[in-house]
Image (tube, grey):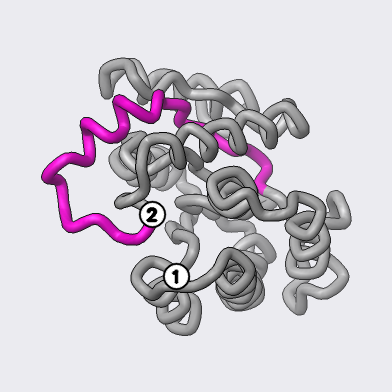
Amino acid sequence: MSGLFISFEGIDGAGKSTHIAALAQAFEAQGRAVTLTREPGGTPLAEALRALVLHEAMDPLTETLLVFAARRDHITRVIAPALAQGRVVVCDRFSDATFAYQGGGRDFDWDVLRVLENWVQARDQIASAVEPGPDVLQPDLTLWFDLPAAVAAQRLVGARVPDRFEAQPSGFFEKVSAGYARRCAQSPSRFARIEAHMSAESVWQQVLASVRAKGWLS
């Protein structure tokens, strides 16, 4: 079978985690091998870079470069090999998050982000062969958990000690949401918008419907 690449996106507090695990289990129940991973992270090096990004003070350019460095290692060591083996890769965030958080939240130059994306995700620069497709590796489906920033903030209150991003004011997350909306508008066939403010069961049904629409789950 051909590999599948599915990403989950959304602001902090959108409720992705439970549904990521459930979708992985749904694919496994139908006999598919699944690689469950996350960004930044997924490899020892990328996890070390994740810790820096989440907890150390830095300017937006440094933050962006570290995120893309982590993504490069993640692609070459985990994502591309898994896709070449025909596995389903389910990833908690990918490059859309960089455009939303650094491009939207941090007001970082969108064109520079595109250049970095083209460098880091260029298929001809990925050692492990993946299925033919666009020149830049992207998920086959991106599930965007769209949630008002105020609702997300309420969900995060008291949940855990906030990192550098979770501690940002609501205005930051409103800009992040706008960044996601912009990415969705640019790639509407890849995105599936999930109304994340609804009940957990309703959200799960939206996730299932989006995946089944692609013909990947019966």
Residue 17 pos. (x, y %): 32, 44
Local crowd size for mark 2, using a 10 Å CA cut-off: few (<14), some (14–19), many (≥20): some
Residue 160 among those drawn in magenta: yes
Q: Position of residue 197 (x, y in %)?
A: 34, 20
Task: Return the residue nearer the eye: 66 or 184.
Answer: 66
Name the image quarter holding residue 67: bottom right
Q: Could you tell me which residue is drawn at 40 percent across and 46 percent down?
A: 24
The boundaries of the magenta stretch are: 139-164
Q: Secondary structure at mark 1?
A: helix
> Which structural element holds mark 2?
loop
The vertical placement of 31 against 65, above or below, is above
Q: Residue at x 41, y 76 (%)?
A: 52
- For the residues labelled 2 and 1, say whether their Cβ atoms are less than 8 Å apart: no
Q: From where the camera sits, is residue 134 visible?
A: yes
Where in the figure is residue 134, as x and y percent of width and height?
Answer: 86, 50
State which quadrant residue 16 falls in. top left
Q: Is residue 29 visible to us here?
A: no
Residue 212 versus residue 71 in the image, above or below: above
Is residue 215 found inside the magenta-colored segment of the image? Answer: no
The residue beneath circle 2 is: 165
Task: Tell me the kind of residue under disc 1.
Answer: Val
Outermost residue, left side: 158
Residue 106 appears left or right of 139 = left
| Amino acid type, callout 2 | Phe
Q: Nearer the viewer, residue 153 or 25?
A: 153
x 54%, y 36%: residue? 175
Choose the circle earlier in sequence order: 2 or 1.
Answer: 1
Question: Residue 81, position in %: x, y?
Answer: 63, 71
Residue 76 to residue 31: above or below = below
Front residue of 116 and 217:
116
Q: Which mark is residue 14?
A: none
**Residue for badge 1:** 53
